[in-house]
Structures are given as structure tokens and as C-alpha cells.
Amino acid sequence: MLEVLEKPAIRRAVIPIDIQTYRKMFAGLKTELIQGAVIEKVSKSKLHAGVLRLLFKYFSSRVNETIEILKEDPITLIDSEPEPDLAIVPARHSIHDEHPTFAYLVVEVSVTTQAIDAEKADMYARGNIPVYWNILPLENTTVVYSKPNANGYTSEKRIPFSEPLSIALPGHSMEVVLESILK
């Protein structure tokens, strides 16, 4: 972090950025808007890319036309426009549709970004995302956040890859055992 932001007087003078300004100023750059702050995205490791590729393939083969799987695409929340690794959202039907403002599930794969991705939980909860999975492939564990409210998620569980993860989607639910997918 910029050392200058550690100084209370400077921090109080920082001007938060809104979503529309962010889109104009940072179009084409590897950034995300997280609670009014522009965050630089880091490059993906081979492990991160592999986990993401297999999860995207898995989910894409198991949803119907009412559901869309996003891969590193923006979703628009209250004061943020993150680009989660995966998001399961209601299907959009036009190239002119706005970014989704809701997701049934958001997934972040954390290889080198554990601290940042853990901090995103509050943002996703405030955006009323029902379930957030923070997948930790180096630990063979997923941190499952659920039951959002304005202060964060009220449930946080660490689930080993060998145990099933559940997600409720319109018309059906899905159980996923990451150990069987991430080989």
C-alpha cells in the first residue's frame, strides 16, 4: 500500500471513486474497483489458471439457459465492480446488457491473493451475494461464506476439497466435490 495512505490526514482527504468514473479512467487496465478504491489485479499463476479452467468447464456443463457462468467478468455492486474468477449469474440475453448486479455464487481462487480475497467477503456480503467461495488450492480447502447482511457474512466455514460444497440455483441445487474436479 502507498505509505502516504497510512497517514490519517491524507486518508481522510482521499476521494473515493464511483463506478462510472472508474469505468472511464481505467478501461483496459488490469484493475478492479473494490469499495471505492482501484486495486491492481495480479497475474495468474499456472495453478490458479488450471483451477479456474476446470471449474469453469465443470459449471458450464451443468447449467441451463437461465444461468450464465462468468469468468473474470465484472459484476456491479454498491460501490464496487470486482471481476471475480467465477460468478454464477442470471442469464443475460443481449450484448448490450449491463454488468450483472447479482450472482448466486461468486468464486475467487487464492494462490497468491489470500489476504485480498478474504477482504472481498465484506464487499460481496454488502452486495447481497448469497454465497462466496474462496478456494485455497495450496491448502486443499475452500472458505465458504454465506448468510450475508450489511455487516458481512454471518457464516464462514472451511471445507476440505474432499467434502461436498452446495449451491442453490433456480430450479435445482448442485453439489460439488472439488477433489474430484481438480486433478
Image: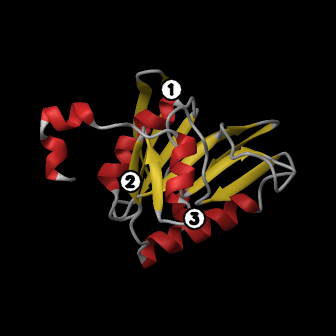
Residue that appears at 65% across and 40% down: 103
Residue at x 56%, y 53% (from the top left corner): 24
> Can you give x and y, in whole percent of width and height, for residue 22 in the image?
51, 48
Instruction: Give the number of the disc on residue 118.
Output: none
The type of residue carrying mark 3 is Ser
Q: Are the two marked residues, 2 and 3, in contact with CB atoms closer than 8 angstroms? A: no
For discs 3 and 1, the disc positioned in front in the rendered view: 1
Q: Amino acid at mark 2?
A: Ile
Using the numbered discs, state the Cα–Cα distance from disc 3 to disc 1 in whole angstroms: 28 Å
Q: Is residue 123 visible?
A: yes
Relative to residue 30, is residue 164 depicted above or below?
Answer: above
Earlier in the chain: of badge 2 and badge 3, it is 2
Q: Position of residue 156 (x, y in %)?
A: 40, 34
Front position among marks 1 and 2? 2
Above or below, comparing residue 20 to residue 27 in the picture:
above
Cα distance between the residues tagged 2 and 3: 33 Å
Q: Residues within 10 Å of mark 2 (few under 14, many from 20)?
A: some
Mark sitting on residue 39: 2
Instruction: Locate residue 87, reporting x and y percent.
Output: 62, 50
**Residue 49 spot, x, y in % from top left:** 50, 73
**Pointer 3 residue:** 180
Can residue 183 be seen? no
- Taking the spot 55% from the left edge, 60% from the top edge, the residue there is 27
Colour scheme in the image? secondary structure
Q: Secondary structure at mark 2?
A: strand
Find residue 178 and report its image quarter: bottom right
Q: Secondary structure at mark 1?
A: strand
Disc ID at residue 148: 1
